[in-house]
Every structure is written in structure tokens, then in C-alpha cells.
Amino acid sequence: MRFDIISVLPGLLESPFAHSILQRAQKKGIAEIVVHNLRDYASNKQKSVDDYPYGGGSGMVMSIEPFAKCIEALKAERDYDEVIFMSPDGVTLNQTIANELSSKGNVIILCGHYKGIDQRIRDLFVTRELSIGDYVLSGGELPAAVLVDAIVRLIPGVLNDETSALSDSFQGELLDAPIYTRPADWKGHKVPEVLLSGHEAKINEWRHEQALIRTRSRRPDLLED
């Protein structure tokens, strides 16, 4: 799967993609992540990619032309399944969306900055708008990194234990059950006996019950449906 990320501050994305699971996925050739500097597509000498908003108001607006040039150049090289804009007013990213996107081939991700981007970019090029929460960040780079991480770990072959991703929180619309490791008894705080029993059916039943309890307590909204 290939991700082309368009950013005015590509340096912000160097570290998230250079470590851990995302780094391994790229080394294995399972995921390809390419970050493009939006300023490379600016037509003015100053390489500026923003301008004052029509109608007045505070802040600067990212211009349509640099984005259009970059997107069109990328589309001339390959087909893309999605052009995603990371925006606080987009649909909130969840596990179902991540699962769906993990089956795609090529994806472009747009990172906004300043006051926002020219609406025509959204109207003409964007196929999906996603948010990572009801708050505003300085730009779309961190949300883009979150999105890529959520997707890549689901692609077969990325995780050493592929069943791990399938048992994560939210995969069954439930939060994950409590997990433990050795020692079984730490200063009187003991691991639940059922987890030491070796009885797979009882362990699975316990985990499901605990997942329900945790979800009902912390995220009852997930159980509404």
C-alpha cells in the first residue's frame, strides 16, 4: 500500500515513519510512505502556498494551485483509491474506517495549515475528510501520522502476530479486556485465576465479559447499537 502525504512541513513526519512498526512495514516493502513538500509546487519565487482570505478575517488560507499541481502530478503516475484531507470537521476516524482503508491500494493525504485550505481543493479533489478528534491542532501532519499508523498495522504481514490486530480494542466494537504478564503474584496483586487455567473457552468467555464491563463503564456509546 502506498501513501503520498502532501505537507508544507514535511520534516514533522520524519520521525513517526522512521521507527517501530511503520519502519518495518516499509523495509518489508509492504507499505510505501512518501512525503511531498507542498512548497515545491508553488509558482512564486517566495515559494509561498498561502494567501489572505476573500471576505476578510484573520489567518491565512492555503492556496488551491500548489495542491492541484501536486495531486495532478501524482495522479499522472498512478491511480489512487482515496484523496483524504485531515480536518477537525471531518468524520471521526475509528477502527471500522481504518479496517476499510487498509484494503486500499494507493492513498493521498493532504495536511492543512494556517486557517485552512481553499474550499475548492476539498470540492474538486478530496474524496474523504477525516478527523482524529474534536480539537484543533497546528496542522494535519500529526493526524496524518495517526491515520497511517492505524492503517498500516492492519495490513497482512506487518505485525509478527497477525491475530494481534484483530483482537485490539474497537475491533468488535468493544474495548479490550485487561491483560497481564509475569509474575503471576506481585506483592499480593494476583493475575485472575482463569488466565492461569489453560482452559481456552473459559479464558475467552472471561475476556469477553471483561471487555463488555470495561466498554459499558468507559465507552457506553459503543454499545448503543
Image: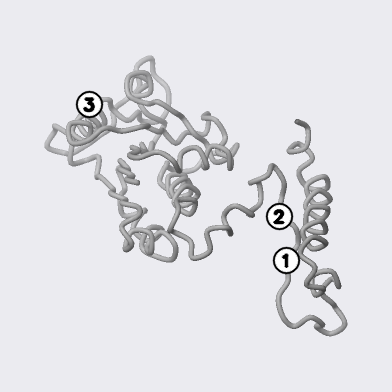
Q: Quadrant of residue 216?
A: top right
Under mark 3, the amino acid is Glu
N-terminal label among 2 and 3: 3
Crowd rating for badge 2 (residues with CA inside 10 Å; few <14, some 14–19, many 20+):
some
Q: Position of residue 165 (x, y in %)?
A: 57, 55
Q: Quadrant of residue 158?
A: bottom left
Q: Position of residue 166 (x, y in %)?
A: 59, 52
| Real-space CA distance between mark 2 and mark 3, rounded to the nearest whole angstrom | 45 Å
Give the left or right position of residue 192, taking residue 122 as reference: right
Count the marks: how many? 3
**Towards the viewer: 170 or 62:** 170
Q: Seen from this angle, which residue lies furthest top? A: 55
Q: Judge whether 114 appears above or below 178 on screen.
A: above
Q: Closer to the camera: disc 1 or disc 3?
A: 1
Under mark 2, the amino acid is Asp
N-terminal label among 1 and 3: 3
Tell me whether the residue at label 2 lies in contact with that at label 1, contact meaning CB atoms closer than 8 angstroms. Answer: yes
| Real-space CA distance between mark 1 and mark 3, rounded to the nearest whole angstrom | 50 Å
Under mark 1, the amino acid is Ile
Residue linked to disc 1: 179
Residue linked to disc 2: 176
